[in-house]
Amino acid sequence: MMFTPVKLGSIELKNRLVMAPLTRMRALAGDVPHPLAKTYYAQRASAGLIITEATQISPLGMGYPATPGIYSADQTAAWKEIVEAVHAKGGSIVAQLWHVGRISHSSLHPEQGLPEAPSAIAAAGQTYGADWQLHDYETPKAMTADDIARLMQEYEAAAKNAKAAGFDGVEIHAANGYLLDQFLQDKTNQRTDQYGGSIENRLRLLSEVIDAVAKVFPSDRIGVRLSPYGQFNDLSDSDPVALFGAAIQKLNGYNLAYVHMIEPRSTSAGGNDQVYEEAPVTSEIFRKAYQGKFISAGGYDQVMGEKVLEEGLADAVAYGRLYISNPDLAERFEKNAPLNPYNRATFYGGGEVGYTDYPAL
C-alpha cells in the first residue's frame, strides 16, 4: 500500500511516504536557506512528498536561530534552486509556512521587538535567542486588529514567494504551539474580540489565513497541519475533542490538498523521544470526520505506517527522524533494507555532518 500512488488534491504522489517538516537550523545570514539544503532535499526526492522545514513568513515569525524565511527575494531565489533540484529527481515539494507567535525571543528580531501572540501570556520555560543561548520566554505583545491585518498580508506574500519558487503547494503550520495553534487553544487565547472566546471565534484566524493563501494557490494545493492534544510549547485546551472536531468540520469546507495531523503519542516535536502509549489516537478520532486526504505523523516505523494505511486511517504517512538519517528511506522500506541510525547531536545547526552525509544504499 505504501508504494501505491495517491493524489492529495492536485498534488500527485508516486508513493505514500511523506518527508515531515524538520527544523535543522542551518540557514545563512538573512534567513536564506543554506546552499547544502539543495543537496539535502534532492537526496530525499524519492519521497512521495517533501514538506520543507518550517519557514517563517516574516522576521517576527522567527523563533529559533538560523531557520529559513520565505519573505525576501534572496530567500525565494534559494528556495527556487531547491525546488528545481527536487523536481529534477521526480519529487514533489511543498513549503511549510510558519509563524511562531510567542515561542520566540526579541533578540531574533530586534527591530520588531517583542514576540506577538493572541494574548500577553508568556510560555513557561526557555528558548534559544540569536546568541544560541537559552533565555526565559518574554511576555508577548497581544496582537491588535492592525497586527492581524498585517499578518494576512504576510501570509499572502509568503505564498506568492512560494509560488514564484515553483513549490507544488504550501502547508499552513497550525500545530505544535506556534501562532495559529495559540489562537486555537484556550490556554493561550484569552481574547474577548471576534478572535477569542467561542470555538468558532478561535477558529477564525486559521480560516482567514487559508483564505489569504488561497488568493495565491488553489485550495487543492494547500495543506494544514494540526496537533490535537499536543502540549509542546506549553499549550493545551480545555476541550480538545470539541475544538479539533470543529476545526475538521471547518476544514471540510475548503477542498484542501490534505490535513496533516500529529499523533500525541509522539510529543517530541523537536524535544525528547517520549512516546505516550495511552494517548488518544488522533487518526482514529478525526480521520472519519475529515472528508479529504489525511496525512498522519508521529513516531511511525514501517510496520505501523503500513497498518495505518491498510486500515484507512491515513492516505499517507509522514516520517521525520528516519528521513534525517535515511535519504533513500523509500527505497530502504521497499527492499526491507536496514536503516541508518540518526545522530541527535547533529539535528540542529552545523554544516554537512548529520545533514547531507548520511549514506544511501
Image (spheres, grey):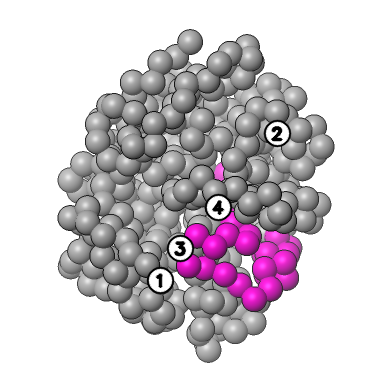
The reply to whether residue 211 is visible in this rendering is: no
Q: Per the image, is 160 magenta?
A: no
Q: Earlier in the sequence, mark 4 or mark 2?
A: 4
Residue occupying the point 68% across, 21% down: 3
Crowding at dot 3, Cα within 10 Å, few <14 / some 14-19 / many 20+, comes out as some
Q: Is residue 171 above or below residue 47?
A: below
Q: Is residue 226 magenta?
A: yes
Note whether 96 is above or below 347 in the view shown: below
Image coords of residue 255 (percent x, y): 68, 51
The residue carrying mark 2 is 304
Q: How many marks?
A: 4
Q: Which residue is mark 3?
A: 233
Q: Relative to 337, is 348 above or below?
A: below
Q: Which residue lies at the image location 34% right of the left edge and 24% below the top edge?
A: 356
Amino acid on which the number 3 mark rests in the picture? Asn
Find the distance from the CA under tag 3 to the CA under tag 1.
Answer: 8 Å
Q: Position of residue 33 (x, y in %)?
A: 28, 39
The local secondary structure at tag 2 comes to helix
Tell me where the magenta segment starts and ends, as one range: 220-249
**Relative to 65, is 111 on the left or the right?**
left
Label 2 environment density (alpha carbons within 10 Å; few <14, some 14–19, many ≥20): few
Q: Mark 2 and mark 1: span between their CA atoms?
A: 34 Å
User: Label 1, on which residue?
Assistant: 124
Asked which quadrant contains residue 279, the reply is bottom right
Residue of label 4: 267
Q: In the rendered image, which quarter contains the N terminus?
A: top right
Badge 1 density bin: few <14, some 14–19, many ≥20, Cα 10 Å: few
